[in-house]
Image (spheres, helix red, strand yellow):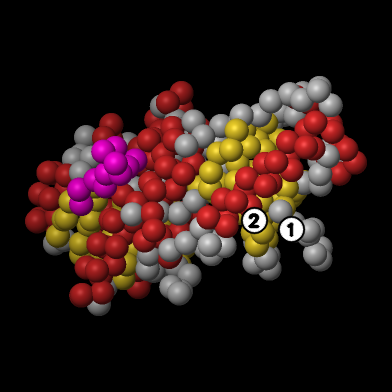
């Protein structure tokens, strides 16, 4: 298992030993298959030269500063991205606060002052559509030219495709929000997951249907309303359960203005109720719908649980899959 990467949250925190580095630059929301291809290439280059494997990313997303109306909803928090990048062998990450001042940097200033002087870049690896600097004036051709002058190599990594679709954060958001979580897993090389605290529900489920864990998700991107086969993990002690999760507005109980994420564990909960969980979305079972009464809803939940158990049996009591299964 890779060691946790060092994380720095501003240029003033960057230590003198950050470089020499092989690095990549981007938002990396989701840390999907395309990102992982780039990260693996960065690691290969760094290891072959004895350099640091590094990432430069941003918080907030640059679009929130330069064009807030077009800013995308984010799937992962910066801390989650760092953890996922650490799985690919990234040793250090600079989360650069993206401000109006940073947005005004010309491509040349961005490269010389940040990449070279602060981060000690000796190799820079980016995707085909990489743009940088004020008003995205810089492209890969300019990056290569600046590298020749300032002493670093540039490598362009082609995009990853999955069944004819280019893997991207925007395409991934569309899959998740349309409920296509199984296909999203192929883009991610892992199941799409929501993390957050377990919060108090309305108490109706425990009394009238089945007990559930209610998740306050951190992600801005949620799967489409409906019922899913899921896997739930206690992030504090790593207990894990097969489960069924409903995302919706509880129409059987009069509806709610607040979206709820309710997870029913297929095996009884032994021990304390988890405080912080991850819910991995594996397969969409059905739409959310209104039932005549709580008993009818309970009957349907138990049917959903039966289908979920069949799903897990079909994969031979599926252990946590290797990322290779999603390529």
The reply, left or right, for residue 128 in relation to residue 34 is left
On the image, the x and y values in percent for residue 84 come to 45, 59
Distance from disc 1 to disc 2, alpha carbons, whole Å, reads: 7 Å
Q: Is residue 31 magenta?
A: no
Magenta region: 157-168
Residue placed under numbered mark 1 in the picture: 267
SS of the residue at dot 1? loop
Circle 1 crowding by C-alpha within 10 Å: few under 14, some 14–19, many from 20 = few
Please state, as top left, top right, bottom left or bottom right, where the N terminus lies in the image: bottom left
Question: Residue at image x 28%, y 56%?
Answer: 38
Query: Label 2 near label 1: C-beta < 8 Å?
Result: yes
Question: Residue at image x 24%, y 51%?
Answer: 126
On the image, the x and y values in percent for residue 290 come to 73, 24
Residue at the extreme right of the image, as rendered: 207
Please state, as top left, top right, bottom left or bottom right, where the C terminus lies in the image: bottom left
Question: Residue at image x 67%, y 59%?
Answer: 241
Residue placed under numbered mark 2 in the picture: 242
Tell which circle, 1 or 2, labels the residue nearer the N-terminal end: 2
Q: Nearer the viewer, residue 5 or 236?
A: 236
Is residue 130 at least partly visible in the picture?
no
């Amino acid at each position: 298992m890779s060691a946790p990467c060092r994380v720095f949250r501003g240029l003033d925190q960057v230590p003198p030993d950050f470089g020499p580095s092989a690095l990549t630059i981007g938002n990396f929301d989701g840390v999907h298959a395309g990102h992982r291809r780039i990260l693996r290439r960065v690691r290969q280059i760094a290891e072959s030269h004895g350099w640091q494997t590094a990432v430069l990313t941003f918080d907030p997303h640059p679009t929130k500063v330069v064009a807030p109306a077009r800013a995308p909803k984010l799937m992962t928090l910066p801390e989650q991205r760092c953890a996922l990048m650490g799985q690919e062998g990234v040793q250090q990450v600079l989360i650069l606060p993206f401000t109006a001042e940073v947005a005004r940097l010309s491509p040349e200033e961005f490269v010389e002052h940040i990449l070279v002087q602060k981060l000690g870049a000796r190799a820079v690896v980016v995707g085909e559509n990489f743009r940088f600097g004020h008003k995205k004036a810089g492209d890969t051709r300019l990056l290569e030219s600046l590298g020749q002058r300032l002493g670093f190599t540039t490598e362009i990594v082609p995009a990853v495709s999955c069944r004819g679709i280019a893997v991207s954060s925007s395409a991934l958001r569309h899959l998740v929000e349309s409920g296509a979580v199984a296909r999203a897993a192929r883009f991610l090389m892992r199941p799409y997951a929501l993390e957050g605290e377990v919060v108090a529900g309305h108490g109706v489920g425990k009394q009238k249907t089945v007990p559930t864990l209610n998740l306050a998700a951190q992600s801005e991107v949620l799967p489409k309303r409906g019922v899913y086969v899921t896997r739930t993990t206690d992030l504090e002690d790593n207990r894990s359960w097969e489960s069924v999760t409903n995302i919706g507005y509880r129409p059987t109980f009069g509806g709610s203005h607040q979206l709820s994420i309710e997870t029913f564990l297929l095996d009884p909960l032994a021990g304390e109720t988890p405080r912080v969980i991850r819910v991995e979305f594996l397969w969409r079972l059905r739409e959310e719908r209104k039932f005549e009464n709580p008993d009818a809803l309970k009957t349907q939940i138990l049917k959903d649980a039966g289908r979920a158990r069949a799903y897990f049996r079909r994969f031979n009591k599926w252990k946590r899959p290797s990322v290779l299964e999603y390529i």
